[in-house]
Amino acid sequence: MTNRARRSTPNIQQAELGLDIPEHDGNAPDLDIQFEQRGAIAHAIKHAKRRGWGREQIIDRMNLCLPDLPKKLTLRQLNAWTADSKEFSEFPARFIPAFCWATHCWLPIETGPHSLGFVLADRDDAEALELGRLQLAEADIRNRKRAIQRRG
């Protein structure tokens, strides 16, 4: 194990998604993303293959991102996680970010947020969104100031 500093967990404000939670279980949406996730993983493997990376290179690259694992991931594991014939073998969620980095394909990590109606944004997009929100807030403040000044 390495002595790397761990990233802090998201704060409560970041974790609150503002989802429209149904009042009772009868309104729960179907959020099983098994087929979407399998398709996204297959697409990522094909994407990596176009870059010249086979499954062995994908596993090697994933292991670079996971230095604290007690045992390195193996090609056998990747094959089991992605085989249609393995009924109960699913790709572990904890390894999806490393897989995305290893394949240079972000589709597998996007399937979860998409199922909830969200999209992922990179830092630049998130900052542009925040800037837009601030500009709207500034415009609202200016309009309220004008309304008060007209009354006064």
Image (cartoon, rainbow, N blue to C red):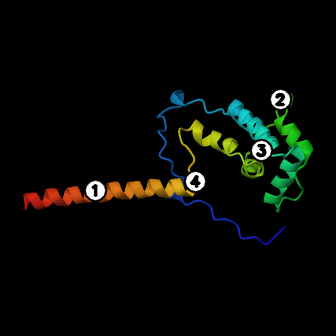
Q: Residue furthest bottom?
A: 3
Residue 108 on image: x %, y %? 69, 42
Nearest to N terminus: mark 4 or mark 3: 3
Apparent side of residue 129 relative to residue 83 in the rendered image (left or right) = left
The residue under label 1 is which amino acid type? Answer: Ala
Distance from the alpha carbon under mark 2 to that under mark 4: 32 Å
Q: Residue drawn at (33%, 54%), measured in percent from left and top?
A: 136
Nearest to N terminus: mark 1 or mark 3: 3
Neighbour tally class for label 2: few under 14, some 14-19, many 20 plus, Cα within 10 Å:
few
Q: Residue drawn at (82%, 69%), measured in percent from left and top?
A: 2
Label 4: element kind: loop
Query: Which residue is labeled 1 in the image?
Result: 139
Q: Residue drawn at (49%, 38%), measured in percent from left and top?
A: 21
Distance from the alpha carbon under mark 4 to that under mark 3: 24 Å
Residue 147 on image: x %, y %? 15, 56
Where residue 92 is drawn, which disc sits there? 3
The quadrant holding residue 112 is top right
Neighbour tally class for label 3: few under 14, some 14-19, many 20 plus, Cα within 10 Å:
few
Residue 47 on image: x %, y %? 76, 41
Query: Which residue is labeled 2 in the image?
Result: 84
The residue under label 3 is which amino acid type? Answer: Pro
Q: Is residue 19 above or below residue 30?
A: below
Label 2: element kind: loop
Nearest to N terminus: mark 1 or mark 2: 2
Q: Nearer the viewer, mark 1 or mark 3?
A: 1
Nearest to N terminus: mark 2 or mark 4: 2
Q: Residue drawn at (27%, 55%), measured in percent from left and top?
A: 140
Whether residue 66 appears in this view of the structure is no
Where residue 122 is drawn, which disc sits there? 4
